[in-house]
Image (cartoon, rainbow, N blue to C red):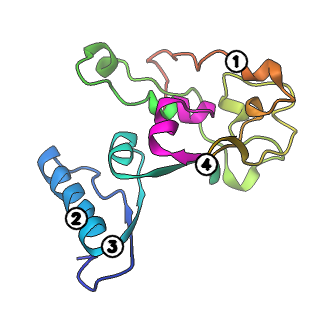
Amino acid sequence: MGGACRPNLIIADEPTTALDVMVQAQILDLLSDLVRDEGIGVIMISHDLSVLGQMCDRLAVMYAGELVESGPSQQLLDDPKHPYTRALSRAFPTIGDPASRMAPAGLPGDPPDPAALGTGCPFAARCPDLHEVCDSTPVELWPTGTGRQSACLRVLPAFPNLSTAPPVPEPSAEGARS
């Protein structure tokens, strides 16, 4: 219905949530056809990185209402720079891996109250790579490669001890949230 009036842009907010895989595929095919055949732009909003990776040229990841990483889809999915993006990408089970289905990765704790964000990184309270300056240093998007940006101090040359941070640890299945 969104394409009936031939718009220039469709904003698809969770267009495939709670759909079976056959209907999901039909919706994604329809959106792809609209982009290819009609030249319609599509902005997709979703938590499903597999759908976004399949459909989008570029991704932007948000946490607590803040943009934390953006870049070409495949680069962002293959090599996430922000700890939240890494955790989000691991929150989905791997096809053919029953262990990942039974114990999906998640994050400990709860997201912050957007009305009570401090001056530092909004992800600091849940970040496994936390550094003492993360709570107090204003965070912005910094370049991390061609067409890529990340809002993490670890990407800055001034913080070499953060650039070699270990990967996000796998939380226990108990109490983990994504």
Instruction: Give the answer, above or below, for where 66 lies relative to 174.
Output: below
Q: Earlier in the sequence, mark 1 or mark 4?
A: 4
Q: Earlier in the sequence, mark 4 or mark 2?
A: 2
Q: Which residue is mark 1?
A: 165
Q: Which residue is mark 4?
A: 147
**What is the x, y in percent for residue 157?**
82, 29
Instruction: Give the answer, above or below, for where 14 lies relative to 70.
Output: below
The Cα–Cα distance between marks 2 and 3, rounded to whole angstroms, is 9 Å
The Cα–Cα distance between marks 4 and 3, rounded to whole angstroms, is 23 Å
Label 4 sits on what residue type? Answer: Gly
Which circle marks residue 39 in the picture? Answer: 3
Q: Earlier in the sequence, mark 4 or mark 3?
A: 3
The Cα–Cα distance between marks 1 and 4, rounded to whole angstroms, is 23 Å
Residue at image point 81% right, 33% down: 134
Label 1 sits on what residue type? Answer: Ala
Asked whether the beta carbons under mark 2 and mark 3 sit within 8 Å of each other, the answer is no
- The quarter of the image holding the N terminus is bottom left
